[in-house]
Image (spheres, rainbow, N blue to C red):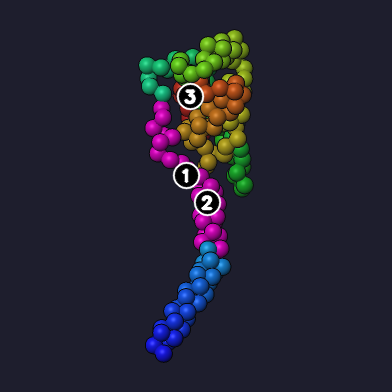
Amino acid sequence: MKKNILTIVIMAASIINLVLTAVLIFSVMPAMNKTSNLIDKVASVIDLEIESKNEKNEQTPVENLEVFEIPYEANVNINLQKEAGDEQDHYAVIKGIRVSFDKEADGFSDVKGLIEKNTTYVEDIVKETISSFSSSTISEEKVKEEAVKKLQERYDTKCIVEISLPGFLVS
């Protein structure tokens, strides 16, 4: 008789465990997924970067960098996007563009030669990138990152690792 009672207790505990597991899977897990999606959306809206630390540490050594400069004779003013309710014109000022190449990357000499022959694409991409921001959303770092991504896509290479904007100023 003790064995039958013990079997019933074990069976009841197993059924309760099964019911609680089902509750956990069908009620808690979807809520956790929704919360995770919400956090991802909020992070992307406020422009937080979610990336591993390994990616940031993969910088090109200074001795592997070669810089090509596109100087301007005078300061260049680039109009920024207008914000709602702001009637004043805002613009960014640059004195030139410096493109840094990784000498060890594939296609370095080809891409550098193309850019040296015709700087128009680099100038257009940088100006287009700057003009896509408004006075409250622009920062030199954001412009540099976005312009490098666009240049890498345009020339289909990873040898363009950085740009700098001498005299960058927002007014």
User: Residue at 50% of width from left, 49% of height from top?
Assistant: 43
**Mark 1 neighbour density, 10 Å: few (under 14) some (14–19) many (20 or more):** few
* Residue 27 vertical position relative to residue 114 in the rendered view, above or below: below
Q: Where residue 40 is drawn, which disc sits there?
A: 2
Whether the magenta-drawn stretch holds residue 45 is answered as: yes
Circle nearer the N terminus (3, 2): 2
Verify CB contact (< 8 Å) between mark 1 and mark 2: yes
- Disc 1, SS: loop
Q: For this rendering, which residue is in front, 30 or 39?
A: 30
Instruction: Please tell me in which quadrant of the rendered image residue 87 appears.
Output: top right
Q: Give the range drawn in magenta.
A: 30-59
Q: For this rendering, which residue is in front, 101 or 84?
A: 101
Q: For this rendering, which residue is in front, 59 or 117?
A: 59
Q: Is the magenta stretch mostly helix, strand or loop?
A: helix
Q: Residue 33 location in percent, x, y?
A: 54, 59
Q: Where residue 50 is drawn, which disc sits there?
A: 1
